[in-house]
Amino acid sequence: MPKSMDASGAAAGPAHGAAASGCRGPLSRRCLPYLLLLPAVVIFAVFMFYPLANTVYLSLFDWNMISPVRTFVGLDNYVSMFTDPYFTKILGNTLLYIALLLLFNFVAPYVFSFVLTFVIKRGRSFYRGALFLPSIISLVVGTMLFVWLLNPISGPAAQIASLFGMHAPIWSTTQGLVIVVISIITSWKMFGYNFIITLAGVGGVSTEVVEAARVDGIPLWRIFLNVVVPMSSSTGIYVLILSIVNGLQQIFTPINMITQGGPDYGSSNMIFNVYNEAFNFYRTGTASAYAIVMMALFVVLLLLEFKYVEKDIYYEN
């Protein structure tokens, strides 16, 4: 007679018992999480790690994307990039874009979410819909709309300025002003999505806590800064990162449509300059070097966020 029988009545032989014990052993339990992560790791390797490694590789060569020969130049592309007189201007424009995008797409949605949740009682649905509406419109269409609105000769802004005896500035050729206008165009498109996410986070703050603070006579600005922002910070940190990463990608469209990085690199940034170096000047090595520096800038920003912001995040809501 067999020594043991399984649930179906079949004999459980030595091989079956060994396999069962092997599948249930501590080694398989340690390997299972890595096996579950393997599909995601493969996708990241194909679509992120390989392109990153290839970009680092291309940054060490002089190549115009046409010639079959790539000339190895080592770190010369990085040296030429850092010694370029326009590099500091492009880097400064990038940091200014980040500051403006955070103001328009992070601070402003927080303020509007607080007002619509705890201050305004009527017309909330209308305001929510109106603020979210631009996010469903194409950024190309929105850029063309702003070009018409801010036309310094025949646009509505010029006509309003003429009523007060003023002239509308030619913003697309004005240093400094062009960055502000392009940031507004991009933020107009992104604001609705960031606003809805922030509104959900602010709406998760306990109403009893806010009402108790108002009964104690605490002003609204202190309630906003000391109660609402800390208690919705888990959502806020997501919107913060999204505003930087997605904003610098979205801002490429109005730059490419309106200014092409001008005047005199006055509206260019690191991401647009990667495209400019690669597809306008055919300097693939320099474009790759700019891409690596841009990635390093993102890493620095994330490290600063993890060190100074992430530790104070409130996740309970």
Image (spheres, rainbow, N blue to C red):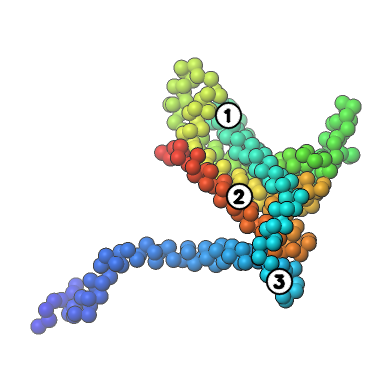
Q: Say what secondary structure mark 2 lies in.
A: helix
Report, in whole angstroms, how far the alpha carbon at label 1 lies from the one at label 3: 59 Å
Amino acid type, callout 3: Thr
User: Dot 1: within a 10 Å radius of its alpha carbon, few (fewer than 14), some, or many (20 or more) residues?
Assistant: some
Residue underneath mark 2? 297
In this rendering, the label closer to the viewer, 2 or 3? 3
Residue 225 vertical placement versus 92 (above, below)? above
Q: Which amino acid does label 2 sit on?
A: Leu
Closest to the observer, 64 or 106: 64
Secondary structure state at the residue bearing disc 3: strand
Residue 41: image location, x then y, percent: 48, 64
Q: Mark 1 points at which residue?
A: 115
Question: Cα distance, mark 2 to mark 3?
Answer: 27 Å
**Outermost residue to the bottom:** 1
Q: For the N terminus, which image quadrant?
A: bottom left
Foreground residue, 67 or 2?
A: 67
Q: How crowded is mark 3: few (under 14 residues within 10 Å), some or many (20 or more)?
A: few
Kindly identify the residue that appears in the image at 70 percent across and 44 percent down. 92
Mark closer to the chain start, 1 or 3: 3
Residue at 64 percent of width and 37 percent of height: 103
Tell me which numbered mark, 2 or 3, is placed earlier along the sequence.
3
Visible residue check, residue 149: no
The answer to whether marks 1 and 3 mark residues whose Cβ atoms lie closer than 8 Å is no
Q: Position of residue 165 (x, y in %)?
A: 90, 27
All told, the count of numbered labels is: 3
Q: Can you tell which mark lies on residue 71?
A: 3
Q: In this view, does 127 lie above or below 36?
A: above
User: Given this view, does label 2 or label 1 mark the residue nearer the observer?
Assistant: 2
Task: State the residue in front, 105 or 265.
Answer: 265
Residue 64: x, y in percent?
A: 75, 68
